[in-house]
Image (cartoon, helix red, strand yellow):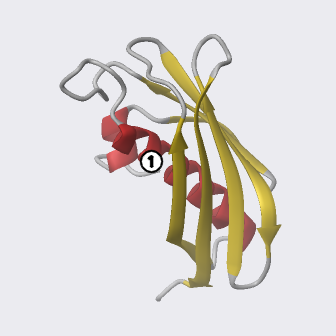
Amino acid sequence: MGRNSLDDRLGIEIIEASAERVVARMPVEGNTQVYGTLHGGASCVLAESIGSCAAAVHGGPRRMALGIELNVSHHRTVSEGMLTGVATKVSAGNTLATYDVTITDDHGRRVCTARVTSLLRDRER
């Protein structure tokens, strides 16, 4: 993930990355809405970031992953601590890669569930 990217601004840190699974952490602080709870859009960014990261690893260095679909369900509010996102491969082929993402709080409670599908295409040279 690049410097000055949205992921960097939200404090997303990749802990583990493979084509099968990506794990990342993100602070709640700084990613809240006016009520002081986690902004749903921040959960969406975390989910798409790690789903796309896994798809990019699957695609390899000559391909890029472009998110084409994101489905998100928010289950509970969080106002402090760290979130952990885990993207797990559902299906990955030559042109599409789909990952299920679970986001949990410091107590292991599910905050959000998402499904991310990315289009894999050759990088422009």
Out of 120 and 47, give the one closest to the viewer. 47
The residue lying at 80 percent from left, 68 percent from top is 91
Left or right of residue 20: residue 36: left
Nearer the observer, 14 or 111:
111
Given residues 7 and 114, the one toward you in this image is 114
Up/down of 80 relative to 44, above or below: above
At horizontal 79% and vertical 79% (from top left) the residue drawn is 93
Asked if residue 125 lies left or right of residue 38, the reply is right
* Side (left or right) of 16 relative to 69: right
Would you call the spot at circle 1 few (<14 residues within 10 Å), some (14-19), or many (20 or more)? Answer: many
Give how far across and how far down residue 8 sits, in percent. 36, 40
Q: Residue at x 45, y 47 (%)?
A: 44
Tell me if 117 is positioned left or right of 91 in this view: left
Figure disc tally = 1
Picture layout, residue 12 above or below residue 68: above
* Disc 1 element: helix
Where residue 34 sits: x, y (%)? 18, 25
Residue 71 against residue 86 in the figure, above or below: below
In-front residue for pair 82/109: 109
Q: Which quadrant of the view contains residue 120?
A: bottom right
Q: Which residue is mark 1?
A: 44
Task: Residue at the far left: name it.
Answer: 34
